[in-house]
Amino acid sequence: MEEDLNRNSRERKYEYTVTDDDRDRRLDVFLVERLPDLSRSHIQKYLQEEELILVNGSQRKPHYKLKPGDAIQVTIPPPRETHLESTDINIDVLYEDDSLLVINKQPGIPVHPSPGHDTDTIVNALLHYFGKTGTLSSIGGELRPGIVHRLDKDTSGVLLIAKNNTAHERISLSFAERRVTKTYEAFVKGVVQPTIGVIDEPIARSVTHRKKFTVSEHGREAVTHYRVIDSLNETSWLSLTPKTGRTHQIRVHLTHIGHPIIGDPIYARKAHQSEYIALFAKELTVTHPMSGELVTFRVPYPAHFIELAKRYGYNLSET
């Protein structure tokens, strides 16, 4: 069944329920047939954008095989100006060569433009940094030049930027094949037991809160390894290595086991106070897209993390 929920708005919304007739059909092919005014490339682009096309509340790949009963929600956004502005925002460069830029992303700044954030993002800062002569890969689209992966707005740490399409494709393949190792650190509420563990729980978008995700048997695979560095004053200091890259994965997994991250504005409003979420991407190891060598990038502790460590009595030199 199809229902246009808002025909008079520039933003169009549709809902479909998959029947037996469409069992095992590709998601993108299914949608192209039902939305003839959109090309397959447009459909695939929307499938990559958060919240635009959801199956049972979760994002899916274009090649996802449909199952009877699947609920598909489609939001076609209104036309928007795609011209990006160059903004003079300081970026902390860790490494740069002809194909790769690695930065220490500061907390409180989004990676790419979105509604409400048109000029204050890492992308805007990159345009200013490179100027007219610099280059960024175009694979991410007009609003995400050079962006291979992302960090949440309030999460700081290592962020890779592709300066050309070859580098972008090779790094993206490394992420897809899970050959990139990312290590995060966090302060969480409560004493975590056991001190070493694996959280293997699928994640889907919440059906009651559009900005939240949750553990759900209908979600996508999500695996997070953790190790307790120390526990003091009813808090724990963790080292975390996600094996998958779902949106909000670490935040959702830690909340699920009863230890939300301190300062998390979505999942832990009452779990102690902090200017920014007490989570940062400390280290990333990846195969260099051109040389083929394994390279590791690390960042120092951010100021808000240091302040929290002092508040709870931790010695950051322990790691």
Image: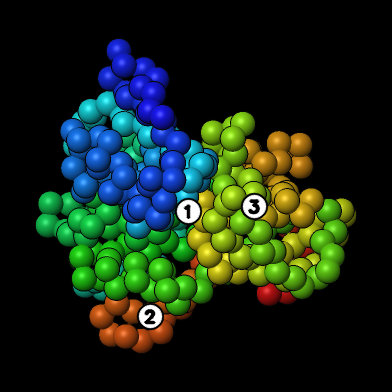
**If you read the primary sequence from the N terminus, does the residue marked by circle 1 or circle 2 appear first?**
1
Q: Quadrant of residue 139?
A: bottom left
**If you read the primary sequence from the N terminus, does the residue marked by circle 2 or circle 3 appear first?**
3
**Residue 46 percent across, percent down from the top left:** 31, 43
- Label 1 and label 2: CA atoms lie apart by 20 Å
Disc 3: which residue: 217
**Residue 164 percent across, percent down from the top left:** 20, 65
- Label 2 and label 3: CA atoms lie apart by 33 Å
Disc 2: which residue: 287
Amino acid tagged 2: Thr
- How crowded is the residue under tag 1: few (<14 C-alpha within 10 Å), some, or many (20+)? many
Amino acid tagged 3: Glu
- Label 1 and label 3: CA atoms lie apart by 25 Å
Furthest toward the left, the residue is 133
Q: Residue at x 30, y 48 (%)?
A: 28
- What is the secondary structure assignment of the residue under circle 2? strand
- How crowded is the residue under tag 2: few (<14 C-alpha within 10 Å), some, or many (20+)? some
**If you read the primary sequence from the N terminus, does the residue marked by circle 1 or circle 3 appear first?**
1
Q: Residue at x 54, y 46 (%)?
A: 154
- What is the secondary structure assignment of the residue under circle 1? loop
Query: In the displayed structure, would residue 116 be above or below residue 212?
Result: above
Of badges 1 and 3, the one in the foreground is 3
- How crowded is the residue under tag 3: few (<14 C-alpha within 10 Å), some, or many (20+)? few
**Residue 191 percent across, percent down from the top left:** 85, 59
Viewer-proximal residue, 82 or 296?
82
**Residue 260 percent across, percent down from the top left:** 73, 49
Disc 1: which residue: 151
Amino acid tagged 1: Leu
